[in-house]
Amino acid sequence: MITSGLVLTLSRDGALTSDAIATLGARSEITPGERYGRWLPVAMEAHDDAASRDLHDWLQSLPGVEYVDVVSVNFDEDEVAQSSIAHSAEAPRHECHEH
């Protein structure tokens, strides 16, 4: 599991900002904090690096969100290690044969 601490810079447009906050609240991977002006801290949880990047890209493209700043990233080392082991086991193996 990857947990990221982010700060979102919200739009000056109140309607876009309200819609963005409502959309964020509907996602189980996102836990919004207390808004301070145009800044909204959020915690984001993802199962792996690819999911974390996808969520970050989704946040960045969300109308009402102008910037996504990464403040911290925490990796659960046991889960990341198991994921890496499983991923390497799925990778195709290439054998070299000498002639």
Image (cartoon, grey):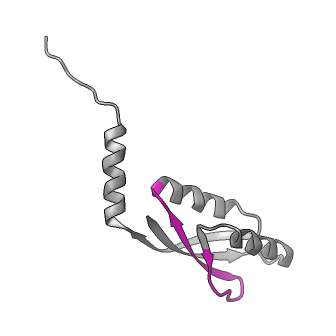
Query: Does residue 20 lie above or below 57 as drawn?
Result: below
Look at 84% across and 79% down and name the residue there.
Answer: 14
Specify the quadrant of the image occupied by residue 23: bottom right
Residue 37 screen position, x and y as percent:
71, 88
Residue 25 placement, left or right of 90: right
Residue 22 placement, left or right of 8: right
Query: Does residue 72 lie above or below 50 as drawn?
Result: below
Comparing 63 with 66, the one in front is 63
Q: Residue 24 magenta-drawn?
A: no
Q: Residue 37 magenta-drawn?
A: yes
Residue 71 screen position, x and y as percent:
49, 76
Comparing 34 with 37, the one in front is 34
Look at 49% across and 53% down and name the residue there.
Answer: 50
Specify the quadrant of the image occupied by residue 16: bottom right
Query: Does residue 34 lie above or below 69 as drawn?
Result: below
Residue 84 placement, left or right of 33: left
- Residue ranking furthest to the left: 99
Q: Quadrant of the C terminus?
A: top left
Residue 39 screen position, x and y as percent:
66, 82
Magenta segment: 31-49
Look at 58% across and 62% down and name the residue there.
Answer: 56
Residue 31 placement, left or right of 21: left
